[in-house]
Image (spheres, rainbow, N blue to C red):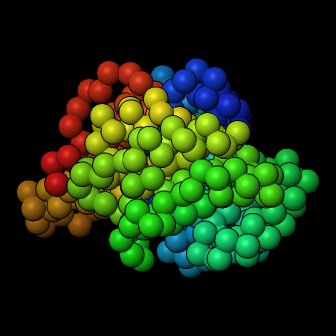
Amino acid sequence: MTTAATADLVTAARAAGRGAAAFNVITLEHAEAITAAAEAAALPVILQISENAVAYHGGRLEPLLAGAAAVARAASVPVALHLDHVQSEQLLRAGVAAGADSVMFDASRLAYGENVRATARVTEWAHGHGVWVEAELGEVGGKDGAHAPGVRTDPVEAAAFVAATGVDALAVAVGSSHAMTRRSARLDHPLIAALRTAVPVPLVLHGSSGVPDGELRQAVAAGVVKVNIGTALNVAFTEAVREQLAAQPAAVDPRRYLRAAREAMSGTAEHLLRVVAGEPARLTTAADRA
């Protein structure tokens, strides 16, 4: 199977009133685990590679993206490739050249007017190359500061931002936070509903690892379409590795503990895929147990 287009997966999910799950890939094991989960759930999925992950790999995007693409092509379900939280326009162009057909360009750190200008410029270039663009308005905290109500996305400003930039999807700040290891976030569901009414493009929820199942389901019902998940997989990965090394302290072959980590990530991903798609959940995630 060829890789799917993010635009097609998000459009189909929106039309069906369900969410489209997007998981962050750091290692090949992540890509394999996520894709296995999607096949087990018989659901499409988006593999996304962040600028932070590229930095971890020494600034080299192509090896990780090529590996993820190979896993996606071998899958029995639709799998799309997406670049996440890209601030560098050079990296964005390199990712498109390497095969990504969608990108989240993140200029949310800039003042509103600068965000608009930078995002509009990137979107014009991306659309000229057939690339779907997600942007962020407001600030989803967690990695460089706590999320506060004062930085949540304003519906009127969001409508103006989408009109001025031409983006295809909008990541909104509605109460989630990046890098949460406990699922204790509470979302502003009236704000999500107001944003859905104000904004003509699909809404995206970042920092979803810290959001409980019920809150995720309610967010999708209120208007969120694309749901980004990263830390929950890393919690599962790390917990499994710790357990394996504690049980086998003399182990030196990484396959022994990486296999367990991959299986743990796959179980968590399958659970969250089903939640986001509105299907019955099957297990308690590692993040719930943390």
Position of residue 49 measured from the top left corner of the image (x, y, whole percent): 57, 58
**Residue 103, image x, y percentages:** 68, 56
Q: In this view of the protein, can residue 8 be seen by the observer?
A: yes
From the viewer's perspective, is residue 281 above or below residue 211? above
Q: Quarter-wise, where is residue 88 in the image?
A: bottom right
Residue under the point 61% across and 29% down: 14
Front-lying residue, 61 or 193: 193
Q: Is residue 276 above or below residue 245?
A: above
Q: Please identify the quadrant where the N terminus is shown.
A: top right
Name above or below for residue 205 compared with residue 147: above
Asked if residue 55 lies left or right of residue 133, the reply is left
Name the one closer to the observer, 79 or 178.
Answer: 178
Q: Is residue 46 visible?
A: no
Quick check: 47 left or right of 176? Answer: right
Q: Residue at x 58, y 20 (%)?
A: 16
Residue 9 locus on image (x, y percent): 64, 33
Which residue in the rendered view is the most extreme toward the left? 247
Q: Nearer the viewer, residue 49 or 205?
A: 205
Residue at the farthest front position:
156
User: Vertically, is 229 above or below 268?
Assistant: below
